Amino acid sequence: MVIAIFTEGTILMHKTGHDFENRANIVAQAKADIDSVHNYANYVPVLGVIDKIDFWANQGAEIYYITSRADYSEIQDILNVLNKFKFPQTHHLLFRTEGNSYTNLVEDLLPDVLIEDDCESMGENSEIIFPTISEPIKKRIKSWVVPEFGGITNLPNRILELALPVIINHD
């Protein structure tokens, strides 16, 4: 099973965001575009994400990370943060190149599961990738959209449950 996870906002956050227990304050910092939002070398994990990803990796999941960074030095900063905090499988860090989009990255990878945040600090969810994926490919991917800076600890622990479609009973 292949799991693709966006980094910034989903599993990583700016360092000063770590000082707040209230997610709304962290989002407000990002909206205010404070300096630490752009200091990628000092990013920190959102609470509990490393344990969750380790748990999935130990069940045999292949983990791919997708960074929003396109500048080489910023990509390296994100990779260094992933390594510093001992995220599993950090050699699987994907990034956009010129003329390439997030949609292209996801469609080329064709993960079983795609995890991204709702991009609340950017407004109107315009940055969520799953809706931009072509319909035939979209049907093959289980999408999870989590609150920005809210982490992934509420997602299923078992990778098979993570990949199952959500069934809503209308009875």
Image: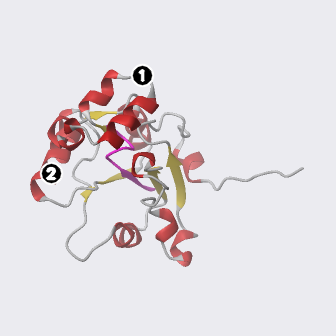
Up/down of 139 relative to 25, above or below: below
Q: Circle 1 — which element?
A: loop
- How many numbered badges does the structure rendering display? 2
Q: Circle 2 — which element?
A: helix
Q: Which residue type carries mark 2?
A: Glu
- Horizontally, is 105 left or right of 131 in the view? left
Q: Residue at x 45, y 51 (%)?
A: 115
**Residue bearing the label numbered 1:** 21
Residue 100 locus on image (x, y percent): 27, 74
- Horizontally, is 39 left or right of 27 in the view? left
**Residue bearing the label numbered 2:** 74
Q: Which of 163 and 133 lies nearest the eye of the viewer?
A: 133
What span is colored magenta in the figure? Answer: 1-12
Q: Which of 22 and 50 lies nearest the eye of the viewer?
A: 22
Residue 22 sits in quarter: top left
Q: Is residue 5 magenta?
A: yes
Up/down of 163 relative to 30, above or below: below
Q: Residue at x 90, y 49 (%)?
A: 171
